[in-house]
Image (cartoon, helix red, strand yellow):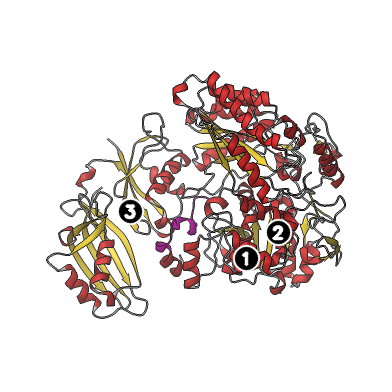
Amino acid sequence: MADRLLFSKTGRAKYISHLDLMRTFQRAFTRAGIEIKHTQGFHKHPFVSIALPLSVGYSSQCEILEFGLVGGATAEEVPARLTAAMPEGIIIHQCYPAERKLKELAFVNYIINFEYSEGRPQASEPAMQELLSRESLVMQKKSNKSKKGYTEVDLIPLIRGFNLECQSDTLTLDAVLCAQNPGLNPELIRAAFCQAYPEYAPDFVTFHRREVLDIDGNPFR
Amino acid sequence: MNRTLEHILPKVQKPARYTGGEYNAVVKDKRTVDTRFALCFPDTYEIGMSNLGCRILYGLMNEQEGLWCERCYAPWGDMEEEMRREGLLLYALESGDPISDFDIIGFSLGYEMAYTNVLNMLDLAGLPLRSADRPELTPLIVAGGTCCYNPEPLAPFVDFFVLGEGEEVTLEYIALYRQAKEECWSKEEFLREVAQIPGIYVPSLYEVTYHADGTVEAITPKDGAPATVTKRIVEDMDKSYFPVKTIIPSTEIVHDRVMLELFRGCIRGCRFCQAGYAYRPVRSRNPKLLAQYGKAACEDSGYQEMTLSSLSSTDYPCLMELCDELLDYCAPRDIGLSLPSLRADTFSMNLMERLQRVRKGGLTFAPEAGTQRLRDAINKNLKEEDLLQSCRTAFSGGWSGVKLYFMLGLPTETDEDVLGIADLARKVYQCWRECTPNRARGVRITVSTSWFVPKPHTAFQWDAQIPMEEYQRRVNLLRDALKRDRSITYNWHDPQTSYLEAIFSRGDRRLADVLETAWQNGAKFDSWSEYFDFQRWMDALKACGLSGDFYAHRVREKDEVFPWSVPSVGVSRQFLWHERELCYQSQTTPDCRTRCSGCGANKFLPGGVCNG
Ligand code: SF4
């Protein structure tokens, strides 16, 4: 069975793309003197796989990477050794043998922060409340598979639950979204909000993954 | 991270280029730092990060206490637009602080087409472009790199230029700067003093006068500045700094691998090659030391690829020994070892076979000229039979492609030489037919030609670049000659940038106005087709009342005062003139190991003996 890492990606590291992150991990294992399994075949390379690719610019404290630990360090030593070999902003929290299948990862808890530099409009909260309480909320989503270049997706069934919190210049949406098959990219919630309420469009939005959950809402590891 | 930056980054392509924070990037506590240096590369992050010279200077400077060197690259157009809109000044990657607050801003100048990016970066930093408009001591604008052997077009913008290898002189001028800051010197006082450090050229201390025909009449030093500024070199490569720990980018760059510099200089003496003259004399590193460095660098970086880089790596005396040792380390770890600058001879081919484990795609040779006569004239020491034999070995070994590089417009070139390129390519094709184990797979032979640009400090510094129509005619001649050979692909270099290179590489300081005008009209990233606009340059030349042909297409008199008369690479003008005369007689000069030809560069070494 494979091994897993739980890591966070914040600060400057937010801007490292998924592919670049995989390469960074491959090199970091070598730098840290940790031996890992290689793929077989003609072009052998160290095998790493990241559970749910994170969009560029998003931060996360619950990323999961699969690999195979061969030697050079014990599982307990891996987090500190590997973190030291990483670029700024990537911290490895745990290294453990995988016990559950990745497809049991059902939900992602996102913290989505809507920022208003001139102060948050009062009505933005009820507006968001209204939007997410609708029966259905259909948005177009880019797709290479479809002939039209996009497909339609209803957001509501993919939102398991949410909570709103207000400050003087931010509106924070704490939402649990479906993770896969199909998953919901929280960017679509931002887009839907700006479409429905252009007058409350924020100046900037940040996205943060706080936790990955199983079907019962418990942390997935 | 700066909030404005954070708001901008989601809108631009490849934002990881603009964040810093990579593995091995050096972050110092500002309270312990008295001097801040912004090491700027006037091109994209991907290109700048691949520059070995910058990696060396970065590591070297950051080893010094109290000195913090950070990096800065030219933002791509989308990023620039956002920065200007949001009023975000050009910042250094490590701290995010605006480079205008730094003590010294140093540019690395490797090619003329990056000059407008220097101006653009100064402007993005919020600094006046011209040295005269920056009366304060800080920030000082400094430049190094091969373009500084004739930096005249940038003379009004840059406070001083550093000639040659920067390892020692950089620390020397920084020490002087620290003294100046401590004692509150004015900028003038500092520039006068720094001009006394060997290898430093302060353009404002030289007055240039011109003849009515536009040629330089005299270059007069003032305030005690030296009449000649000779480049600096590192005498002993074994004692020089090697960047074992370098920044490992979190995103892809052009040369994303360990670069092992075997030696500096080149023994060959190709008459067109500026690097060949400018880096003399040859100085090699000890193979044991190199092997150690190479292994340590792999270990520290996690790179799976190492390249042996030097001007002509196969001239390294202990190459076999070094490769064997490196292979012992690399092979079991699946680290690829490559040799980019191969000569076409049997020795190199054997080596190549041992190094390349899997990739058998393309092989590259640069015969530069199509006939032996012209190769002799430019002193390109390559025999046709060696080239063909190398190709035979390669094809028998399963290679299925060869790239051949040539120049058109070399001095003394005739149509016969141009057509000789086609002949040579056909002979290579013939070799493939005879040797390939797999004819069904086919072969790709690519012939590429560029338009020869005469460079300062070479044997051809007096020569004219052929006119553009003539270049085009020779391209057509060759294209027609190769029309029927379906296995041979012919590519020719776009002539417009080569024309500008010919203007700026031998230009004088009047061209500064042209640079500024072109930049004002939008010129930047001129080596990128996305941005390059030839007409903009023609308009700028016209607006400044200067003729591009005067710089590019004019043959110089033997004793003409060149705009680059003050900087010296240590090779005597008489030697270069003699080399030029030999060219016109199609006579060769032996390489430095076979026999010293007395170029003058031996004076850099202890005892005055070249022994690399
Ligand atoms: S002095 Fe002689 S050996 Fe030394 S670089 Fe010049 S020609 Fe070559």
One can see residue B162 in this view: no
- Binning the other alpha carbons within 10 Å of mark 2 as few (below 14), some (14 to 19) or many (20 upward) gives many
Same chain for mark 1 and mark 3? The answer is no
Horizontal placement of A115 versus B30: left or right? left
* Along the line of sight, the residue nearer the viewer: B526 or B278: B526
**CB at disc 2 and ligand 1 closer than 8 Å:** no
Q: Amino acid at mark 3?
A: Leu
**CB at disc 3 and ligand 1 closer than 8 Å:** no
Whole-Å distance between the Cαs marked 1 and 3?
42 Å
Residue at image location 55% in from the left, 28% down from the top = B355
| Residue bearing the label numbered 1 | B518
Q: Quadrant of residue B260?
A: top right
Residue at image location 77% in from the left, 51% down from the top = B231
* Along the line of sight, the residue nearer the viewer: B198 or B569: B569
- Which of marks 1 and 2 precedes in the sequence? 1
Q: Quadrant of the N terminus of chain A?
A: top left
Whole-Å distance between the Cαs marked 2 and 3?
52 Å
- Percent x, y for residue B276? 73, 41
Under circle 2, the secondary element is helix
Q: Quadrant of residue B108?
A: bottom right
User: On what subunit does the disc labeled 2 rest?
Assistant: B
- Binning the other alpha carbons within 10 Å of mark 3 as few (below 14), some (14 to 19) or many (20 upward) gives some
Under circle 1, the secondary element is helix
Q: Given the current orientation, which residue lies at the most extreme left position?
A: A135
| Residue bearing the label numbered 3 | A54
Relative vertical location of residue A180 with respect to residue A39 in this rendering, above or below? below
Q: Amino acid at mark 2?
A: Gly
Q: Are marks 2 and 1 in contact (CB under 8 Å)?
A: no
Horizontal placement of A16 versus B144: left or right? left
Same chain for mark 2 and mark 3? The answer is no
User: On what subunit does the disc labeled 3 rest?
Assistant: A
* Along the line of sight, the residue nearer the viewer: B117 or B404: B404
